[in-house]
């Protein structure tokens, strides 16, 4: 069988003596790719020559590129260098409980979830900050030059990232045919060899199909329930999305997901509306100090402004070391501070609403609860008013009047109770934030 000797690449194990050589491998590279043929006659000739005529044949064993026979040398070009990466166990499949897994124990596992969908488990070798369950983490998976940017979710034990979804299928196709896979995410970077991965992954795929067959009714019920839940939640999600967009246009911040105990009082928001308009805004309560001393501030965000601009502020002065505000309206407080008068007025509005509803009262009501600062005859006053409208709605109205010009802010009864609570939280926070060194020493015994 004729062939071009210049295109022959001969590789001979360099550690074997020429006199003991009995096998030579010839690789023939043609224009279409790589073909591997064994030429028995040529092998016999080289073996006999190597044994019978010392020195007749020599090999450049350093690079295994050149073979010389009788002074005639053939240069086959550079060979592929062997990988220096450490060897790893071959992939295999196994059962854990009643589910099948494929892995070689080096950080990457193929399995399936309760609905028989194939998923990847990526081991977290190096922990990263905020590594809490259900945290979403970007992951890069590279197999033979093909890159897959995916997202993993931290599992309940914070030891594994779970990759699911439609991107898993093409990744598995590459895992079955590739030599190795490189996985990178948040301080983790490792390579997994893929020897034996095809058979192991195909076993898991068959296991997933078997799982689906045995649990078809249960899986179908779960999918139906998930679809029905999604359909039910879509209107609410749509409303929430529109509300967030509308609030953003009005300069209202999204509600924080932190618990109340995890935030400062000034981070909490209470919604208000301007009577007679469609303007809805938010306000917050804080404490501060000015030339007159400590005060609790009611800060109203301009609902018509694109950015969160403070449109109005009401300041209520208070003193430290006062008794806690008595919020039971049946008990008369020994000392009625301004902030406590304000808090009790908001609570009284709720009491009046309950009374009118019990009496089935239907007519509109506008009734002053109390003057917090000043009185009706003063140039400046701040009052709390109870409102019942013709449509049956209730509101607490704050009236901040200066020289005959009033600024009105309405709250629903529920929001008014929230305002009462965070007002007292601000007073408590102010007391803790202004402790003297002696007071601090007393509580840190």
Image (tube, rainbow, N blue to C red):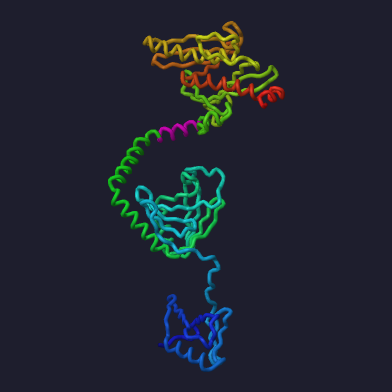
197, 351: nearer the viewer? 197
| 368 drawn magenta | no
- Left or right: where does residue 354 sit relative to residue 63? left
Q: Quadrant of the N terminus?
A: bottom left
User: What residue is rendered at 29% in x and 50% in y?
Assistant: 214
Residue 129: in sight, yes or no? yes
Q: Which residues are magenta?
A: 237-249
Name the spot of residue 247 as percent of width and height, x first.
49, 31
Name the spot of residue 190 as percent of width and height, x first.
53, 58
Kindly indicate the quadrant of the structure image that contains residue 341.
top right
- The secondary structure that dominates the magenta segment is helix
121, 406: nearer the viewer? 121
90, 183: nearer the viewer? 90
Residue located farthest toward the top when viewing the structure as drawn: 377
Q: As displayed, is residue 9 above or below residue 142?
A: below
98, 25: nearer the viewer? 98
Q: As displayed, is residue 48 above or below residue 389?
A: below
Residue 274: in sight, yes or no? no
Q: As displayed, is residue 45 above or below residue 154?
A: below
User: What residue is rendered at 30% in x and 45% in y?
Assistant: 218
Name the spot of residue 387 as percent of width and height, x first.
46, 13
Q: As displayed, is residue 108 above or below residue 129?
A: below
């Amino acid at each position: 069988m004729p062939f071009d000797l210049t295109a022959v690449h001969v590789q001979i194990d360099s550690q074997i003596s020429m006199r003991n050589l009995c096998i030579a491998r010839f690789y023939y590279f043609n224009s279409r790719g790589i073909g591997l043929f064994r030429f028995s006659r040529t092998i016999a000739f080289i073996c006999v020559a190597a044994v019978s005529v010392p020195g007749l044949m020599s090999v450049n064993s350093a690079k295994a590129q050149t073979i010389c026979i009788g002074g005639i040398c053939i240069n086959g070009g550079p060979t592929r260098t062997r990988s220096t990466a450490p060897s790893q166990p071959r992939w295999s499949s196994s059962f854990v409980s009643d589910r099948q897994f494929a892995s070689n124990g080096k950080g990457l596992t193929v399995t399936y979830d309760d609905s028989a969908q194939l998923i990847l488990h990526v081991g977290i070798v190096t922990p990263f900050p905020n590594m809490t369950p259900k945290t979403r983490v970007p992951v890069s998976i590279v197999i033979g030059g093909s890159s897959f940017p995916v997202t993993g979710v931290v599992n309940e034990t914070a030891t594994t990232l779970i990759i699911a979804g439609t991107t898993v299928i093409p990744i598995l196709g590459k895992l079955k045919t590739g030599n190795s896979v490189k996985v990178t995410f948040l301080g983790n970077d490792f390579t997994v060899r893929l020897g034996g991965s095809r058979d192991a992954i195909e076993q898991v795929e068959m296991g997933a199909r078997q799982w689906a067959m045995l649990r078809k009714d249960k899986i179908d019920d779960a999918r139906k329930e998930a679809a029905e839940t999604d359909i039910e939640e879509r209107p609410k999600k749509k409303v929430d999305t529109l509300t967030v967009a509308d609030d953003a246009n009005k300069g209202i911040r999204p509600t924080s997901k932190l618990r109340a105990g995890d935030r400062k009082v000034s981070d909490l928001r209470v919604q208000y509306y301007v009577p007679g308009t469609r303007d809805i805004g938010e306000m917050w309560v804080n404490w501060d100090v000015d030339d007159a001393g400590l005060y609790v501030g009611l800060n109203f965000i301009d609902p018509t402004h694109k950015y969160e601009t403070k449109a109005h502020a009401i300041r209520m002065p208070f003193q430290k070391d006062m008794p806690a505000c008595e919020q039971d309206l049946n008990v008369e407080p020994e000392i009625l501070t301004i902030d406590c008068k304000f808090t009790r007025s908001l609570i009284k509005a709720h009491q009046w609403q309950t009374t009118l509803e019990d009496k089935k009262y239907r007519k509109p009501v506008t009734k002053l609860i109390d003057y917090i600062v000043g009185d009706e005859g003063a140039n400046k006053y701040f009052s709390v008013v109870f409102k019942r409208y013709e449509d049956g709605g209730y509101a607490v109205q704050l009236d901040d009047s200066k020289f005959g010009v009033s600024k009105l802010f309405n709250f629903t009864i529920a929001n008014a109770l929230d305002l009462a609570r965070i007002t007292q939280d601000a007073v408590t926070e102010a007391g803790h934030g202004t402790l003297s060194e002696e007071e601090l020493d007393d509580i840190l015994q």
